[in-house]
Image (cartoon, rainbow, N blue to C red):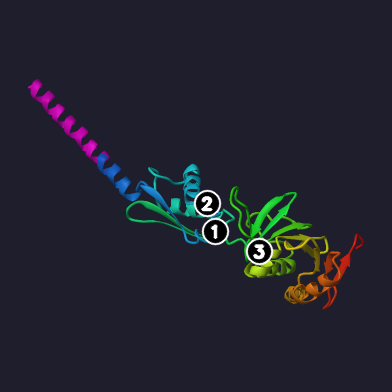
């Protein structure tokens, strides 16, 4: 009788262990179904052909090194939100979309900011886009934009240039220069003084352009172009001594300065 009772106890214990094992398997399977494991990250940069400030591989590594997401890690809505916040924190990112698909792939699609001008100061350098938002330059990659130096405060990443009126004029001027084959070839560096007056040298000659304030820049550039096309050839035929400075700060006139006196 004792042997029968012992055998029965063993059978009950066996079923109990088996039941616990089944429950554990069901629990793990249920947990995995509710929180899938990431099978990979796919990066899409919409305007990569236009500007190459962000490399897809570098962005993927940044996400994985953050330990927020990556292959083999849990993937859920909270993870997607954290990835979205992480990528959005990069100043060179203008718009970003992050989402997961049914095949457990994390997708990140973004649009880069387009540089309009580069600012270089003793504190460092950055680009500004058409909205005046600052974002960092990238080692080994240079955008064909006008360079601004001088007395100008370097904005923090993701922030706008503080002087809004000057910033608007500067961005409009830089875009105009970049879109003009002639002026884009002539004007490479714009220097700003403490009063927001600008000057620059032209590539085709050795003289300096004192441009003054940037408001009314189209009229000033038109006057300068007329000088180059009509006055300059006439002047060159009769006087071989070069002028050192062309001053455009005066209303509707250009003052040519020769020698060492300003």
Q: Which residues are magenta?
A: 1-24
Is residue 73 found inside the magenta-colored segment of the image? no
Give neighbour class at mark 3: few <14, some 14-19, many 20+ (Cα, 10 Å).
Answer: many
Quarter the C terminus occupies: bottom right
Left or right side of 64 for 257: right
Q: Give the mark toward the camera: 1 or 3.
A: 1
Residue in the picture at 40% in, 44% down: 73
Q: Is residue 6 above or below residue 146?
A: above
Q: Nearer the viewer, residue 168 or 230?
A: 230
Left or right side of 212 for 120: left
Quarter occupied by residue 224: bottom right
Residue 145 badge: none
Q: Nearer the viewer, residue 232 or 159?
A: 232
Q: Is residue 99 above or below residue 1?
A: below
User: Which numbered disc, 3 or 2, marks the residue that appears first in the sequence?
Assistant: 2
Q: Which residue is mark 2?
A: 86
Q: Are marks 3 and 2 in contact (CB under 8 Å)?
A: no
Q: State the image coordinates of residue 84 (x, y, percent, origin top left).
A: 49, 55
* The residue positioned farthest toward the right in the image shown: 261
Quarter occupied by residue 261: bottom right
Left or right side of 9 for 233: right
Residue in the picture at 64% in, 68% down: 181
Residue 51 badge: 1
Q: Which residue is mark 3?
A: 132
């Amino acid at each position: 009788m004792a042997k029968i009772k012992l055998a029965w106890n063993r059978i009950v214990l066996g079923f109990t262990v088996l039941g616990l094992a089944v429950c554990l398997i069901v629990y793990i399977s249920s947990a995995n179904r509710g929180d899938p494991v990431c099978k990979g990250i796919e990066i899409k940069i919409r305007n990569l052909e236009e500007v190459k400030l962000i490399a897809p591989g570098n962005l993927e590594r940044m996400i994985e090194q953050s330990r927020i997401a990556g292959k083999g890690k849990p993937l859920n809505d909270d993870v997607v939100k954290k990835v979205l916040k992480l990528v959005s924190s990069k100043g060179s990112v203008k718009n970003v979309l992050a989402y997961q698909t049914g095949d457990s792939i994390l997708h990140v699609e973004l649009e880069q900011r387009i540089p309009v001008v580069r600012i270089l100061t003793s504190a460092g350098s950055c680009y500004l886009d058409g909205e005046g938002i600052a974002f960092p330059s990238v080692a080994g990659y240079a955008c064909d934009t006008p360079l601004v130096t001088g007395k100008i405060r370097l904005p923090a990443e993701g922030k706008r240039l503080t002087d809004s009126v000057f910033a608007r004029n500067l961005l409009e001027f830089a875009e105009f220069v970049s879109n003009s084959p002639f002026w884009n070839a002539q004007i490479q560096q714009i220097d700003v003084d403490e009063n927001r007056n600008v000057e620059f040298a032209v590539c085709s000659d050795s003289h300096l352009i004192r441009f003054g304030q940037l408001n009314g820049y189209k009229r000033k550039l038109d006057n300068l172009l007329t000088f180059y096309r009509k006055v300059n050839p006439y002047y060159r035929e009769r006087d071989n001594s070069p002028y050192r400075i062309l001053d455009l700060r005066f209303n509707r006139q250009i003052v040519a300065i020769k020698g060492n006196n300003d």
